[in-house]
Image (tube, rainbow, N blue to C red):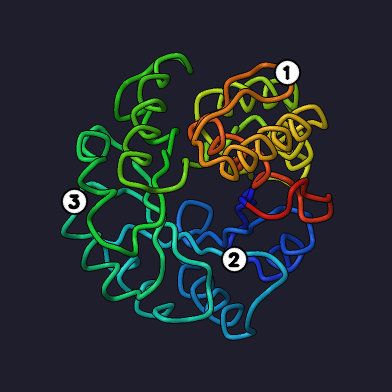
């Protein structure tokens, strides 16, 4: 299943890491960067390493390291290289050479966060910098400051661009950045619905109370699942007949592009729910 929610948790707080793993998010991101004071960087890194040494958890665990071009980031990557993590989130990505070096040292999948104009400008290069690059995303707070954007609408083009850059490189659809007003669940819903419509699949969150809203938006409805099942059934009939396109029972045209969209809908189905037509 494609994760719908990615819960950040401060890495220096071992008690919160344990709670985050039980909070119901589809994935957990142990943060070694922004949420960790300078004096706690070593403790956060040690906590992340101990968690990795425990072996697989019941959900993917990623670690957001510090800037890979700085001393903290280098130490993070060296400490976590090759361990049992889903991968590393890498902030402040701007230089493909730095990403290649980080990937080679880490030996783990990397999700790259674009947080500056320089990073956005080289998004396509960064996406293809190394085979271990597993995704692109935005760090919208830092990006807004760097671009001097004064409102949310000013990031619309950047969101569209990172979707294009990721998909052009054959990477998964990007994960939307955090919604920082934790108390504003209505605003979170509106923003997340806009993100889904714009090509994002899943969202980073900073508090467990945000998880149900994000799951609700990114979990297909019963009607969407029924429609996806019908598309795959029509596609199967077309394949049996030696065709690549066919009209479904409701007279809708079904071709390979429509089938790919239907499979994405099924891939967003929660593990506890039955997936019509099997796995995608």
Q: Look at mark 1 in the image and give the residue it sits on.
A: 250
Residue at the extreme front of the image, as rendered: 241
- Closer to viewer: mark 1 or mark 3: 1
Mark 2 or mark 1, earlier in chain: 2
Q: Position of residue 256 (x, y in %)?
A: 49, 35
Secondary structure of the residue carrying numbered label 2 = strand
* Pointers 1 and 3 in contact (C-beta within 8 Å): no
Q: Position of residue 268 (x, y in %)?
A: 67, 44
Q: Position of residue 91 (x, y in %)?
A: 37, 51
Q: Look at mark 2 in the image and give the residue it sits on.
A: 61
* Pointers 2 and 3 in contact (C-beta within 8 Å): no
Cα gap from disc 2 to disc 3, whole angstroms: 25 Å
- Residue name at image x 29 percent, y 48 percent: 127
Mark 2 or mark 3, earlier in chain: 2
- Residue name at image x 28 percent, y 76 percent: 105
- Residue name at image x 58 percent, y 40 percent: 241
- On screen, 190 above or below 120? above
Cα gap from disc 1 to disc 3, whole angstroms: 50 Å
Quadrant of the snapshot with the N terminus: bottom right
Question: Horizontally, is 82 left or right of 240 in the view?
Answer: left
Cα gap from disc 2 to disc 1, whole angstroms: 42 Å
**Depth order, front residue of 144/275:** 275
Question: Horizontally, is 275 left or right of 201 in the view?
Answer: right
Please rate how many residues cluster around mark 3, counting C-alpha atoms within 10 Å: few if below 14, some from 14 to 19, many from 20. some
Residue 89 — which label? none
Question: Horizontally, is 180 left or right of 63 in the view?
Answer: right
- Closer to viewer: mark 2 or mark 1: 1
Please rate how many residues cluster around mark 2, counting C-alpha atoms within 10 Å: few if below 14, some from 14 to 19, many from 20. many
Residue 177 in sight: no
Q: Position of residue 71 (x, y in %)?
A: 28, 68
Q: Look at mark 3 in the image and give the residue it sits on.
A: 95
**Depth order, front residue of 240/94:** 240
């Amino acid at each position: 299943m494609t994760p719908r929610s990615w819960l950040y948790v401060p890495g220096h707080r071992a008690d919160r890491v344990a709670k985050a793993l039980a909070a119901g998010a589809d994935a957990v991101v142990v943060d070694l960067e922004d949420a960790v004071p300078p004096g706690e960087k070593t403790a956060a890194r040690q906590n992340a390493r101990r968690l990795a040494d425990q072996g697989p958890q019941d959900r993917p665990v990623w670690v957001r390291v510090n800037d890979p071009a700085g001393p903290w980031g280098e130490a993070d990557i060296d400490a976590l290289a090759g361990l049992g993590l889903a991968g590393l989130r890498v902030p402040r990505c701007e230089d493909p050479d730095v990403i290649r070096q980080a990937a080679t040292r880490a030996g783990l999948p990397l999700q790259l966060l674009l947080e500056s104009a320089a990073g956005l400008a080289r998004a396509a290069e960064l996406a293809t910098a190394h085979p271990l690059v597993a995704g692109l995303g935005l760090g919208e707070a830092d990006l807004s400051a760097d671009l001097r954007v004064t409102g949310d609408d000013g990031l619309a083009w950047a969101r569209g661009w990172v979707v294009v850059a990721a998909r052009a490189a054959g990477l998964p659809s990007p994960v939307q950045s955090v919604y920082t007003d934790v108390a504003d669940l209505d605003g979170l819903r509106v923003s997340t619905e806009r993100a889904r419509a714009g090509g994002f699949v899943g969202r980073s969150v900073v508090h467990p109370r945000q998880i149900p809203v994000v799951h609700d938006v990114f979990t297909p409805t019963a009607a969407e699942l029924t429609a996806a099942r019908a598309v795959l059934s029509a596609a199967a009939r077309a394949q049996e007949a030696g065709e690549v396109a066919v009209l479904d029972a409701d007279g809708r045209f079904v071709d390979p592009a429509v089938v790919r969209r239907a499979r994405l809908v099924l891939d967003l189905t929660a593990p506890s729910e039955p997936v019509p037509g099997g796995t995608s």
